[in-house]
């Protein structure tokens, strides 16, 4: 009588998963043990054989190699990034030092020139130079005025290491160069005598541009918040500014894009001279009988 | 005891020699390590069950490593490298957990 084949298990289609979970031990061990029991030897061969030892040594080397490889990759990436960051900081410091030196040399030139200009033969040239220097940004200025702080929208938190393209897409709340341009133009129009942004004095040749996400004033990148100082009559400046189109633009930006701003009058503002002005033309000053000639700075 | 000393000796040897893994083998090293660990835990469980055989241990070790690396290599050539390596890691992980559970029952009677 033929035997009926064993009834199919209900989970026969899951043999793969059940085998993986129920038989994790290699069936070779059981088969070898059966053979040894049949031959009368003890079931376990013991773990003292040289082959096992050799294999475990190989395993140790393999584990160490994998661990060292994983560690080596992360440390080299971190080292590269640190090196780049240090280089950026170093160059930034160097640029700042050069600018400081520029400013100090400029003051020396100014004092030399002032000394020359006080010669009586040159008449009112010294006063003219001082007045022009105030307006063009060649001289440092102290006086009353207004302080306008403009900042990006509060929701635009800077993401460290974030994707710059994603940040640019969410840049609606970012202060743009044309926003600063409209504010500064409005200040000049209502009677500001000297204007600076984040310590950069604006001259008659200053450009406010953006490159990527940074705003450049005279090719120096600035980061928010932007502090705009304007020297002039504080009341006239603040009322005139809010009535001017530039002031209304600022209110529009604050209402629609969340740009934060704050206007305050100040009784004493100190604006530095511009570090970026240089002599472009020179002609000897007309002298009446004096034996020395002086250079005069033409305001471009 | 002696096998554990062998493993420690292997680790110390690796730290001293600092073997530089060739570039072509670097993607397969992690999966080879997991496959080797599966074979080792299987051998440990067989030892505690009383049916350890060193020939089976060696064969299972080598075949696990080679087959796992081969499957990952095949997946890379076919373009499904990450999926296949995920599958291999899942299967090996289940086996490692089952063997470790059996070892735990032997060692702690719990």
Image: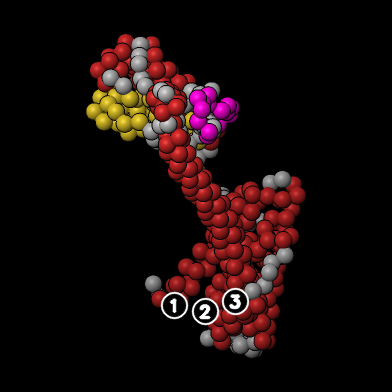
Q: Nearer the viewer, mark 2 or mark 3?
A: 3
Q: The disc numbered 2 marks a residue on which chain?
A: B
Q: Label 1: state its secondary structure.
A: helix
* SS label for mark 3: helix
SS state under label 2 = helix
Residues drawn in magenta: A279-292
Q: Is residue A250 magenta?
A: no
Marks 2 and 1: CB-CB under 8 Å?
A: yes
Mark toward the start of the polypeptide (1 vs 3): 3
Q: In the rendered image, is residue A237 in sight?
A: yes
* Residue occupying the point 35% across, 28% down: A229
In the rendered image, the quadrant that contains the N terminus of chain A is: bottom right
Magenta segment main secondary structure: loop
Q: Using the image, tell me which numbered label, if any, was put on residue B15.
A: 3
Of residues A69 and A272, the one nearer the viewer is A272
Give x and y (percent) for residue A30. Answer: 62, 74
Q: CA distance from mark 1 to mark 3?
A: 30 Å
The answer to which of A228 and A41 lies nearer the viewer is A228
Q: Is residue A92 visible?
A: no
Q: Residue at x 42, y 36 (%)?
A: A115
Do pointers 2 and 3 mark residues of a single chain? yes
At horizontal 63% and vertical 83% (from top left) the residue drawn is A53
Q: Nearer the viewer, residue A63 or A265?
A: A265
Mark 2 to mark 3 CA distance (whole Å): 30 Å
Left or right of A50 in this view: A154? left
Residue under label 2, please give it.
B48
Can you give x and y, in whole percent of width and height, for residue A298 in the image? 53, 25
The residue beneath circle 1 is B107
Question: Between marks 2 and 1, how big is the CA–CA gap?
Answer: 8 Å
Above/below status of A248 relative to B9: above
């Amino acid at each position: 009588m033929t035997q009926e084949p064993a009834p199919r298990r209900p989970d026969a289609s899951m043999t793969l998963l059940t085998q993986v979970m129920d038989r994790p031990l290699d069936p070779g061990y059981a088969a070898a043990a059966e053979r040894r029991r049949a031959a009368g030897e003890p079931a376990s061969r013991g773990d003292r054989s040289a082959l096992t030892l050799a294999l475990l040594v190989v395993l140790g080397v393999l584990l160490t190699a994998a661990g060292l490889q994983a560690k080596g990759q992360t440390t080299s990436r971190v080292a590269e990034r640190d090196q780049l960051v240090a280089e950026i900081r170093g160059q930034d410091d160097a640029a700042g030092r050069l600018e400081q030196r520029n400013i100090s040399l400029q003051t020396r030139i100014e004092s030399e020139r002032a000394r020359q200009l006080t010669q009586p033969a040159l008449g009112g040239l010294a006063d003219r130079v001082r007045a022009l220097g105030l307006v063009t940004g060649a001289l440092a200025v102290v006086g009353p005025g207004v302080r306008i702080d403009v900042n990006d929208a509060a929701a635009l938190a800077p993401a460290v290491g974030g994707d710059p393209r994603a940040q640019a897409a969410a840049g609606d709340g970012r202060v743009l160069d044309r926003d600063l341009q409209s504010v500064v133009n409005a200040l000049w129009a209502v009677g500001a005598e000297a204007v600076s942004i984040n310590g950069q004095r604006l001259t008659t040749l200053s450009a406010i541009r953006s490159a990527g996400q940074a705003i450049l004033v005279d090719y120096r990148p600035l980061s928010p918040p932007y502090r705009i100082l304007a020297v002039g009559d504080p009341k006239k400046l603040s009322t005139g500014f809010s009535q001017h189109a530039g002031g209304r633009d600022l209110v529009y930006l604050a209402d629609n894009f969340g740009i934060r701003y704050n206007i305050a009058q100040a009784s004493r503002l100190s604006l530095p001279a511009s570090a970026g002005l240089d002599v472009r033309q020179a002609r000897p000053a007309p002298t009446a009988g004096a034996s020395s000639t002086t250079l005069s700075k033409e305001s471009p | 005891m002696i096998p554990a000393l062998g493993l420690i000796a292997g680790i110390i040897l690796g730290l001293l020699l600092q073997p530089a893994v060739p570039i072509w083998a670097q993607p397969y090293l992690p999966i080879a390590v997991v496959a080797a660990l599966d074979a080792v835990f299987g051998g440990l469980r067989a030892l505690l069950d009383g049916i350890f055989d060193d020939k089976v241990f060696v064969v299972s070790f080598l075949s696990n490593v080679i087959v796992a690396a081969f499957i990952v290599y095949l997946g890379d050539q076919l373009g499904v490298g990450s999926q296949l390596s995920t599958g291999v890691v899942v299967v090996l992980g289940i086996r490692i957990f089952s063997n470790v559970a059996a070892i735990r029952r032997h060692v702690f009677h719990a």
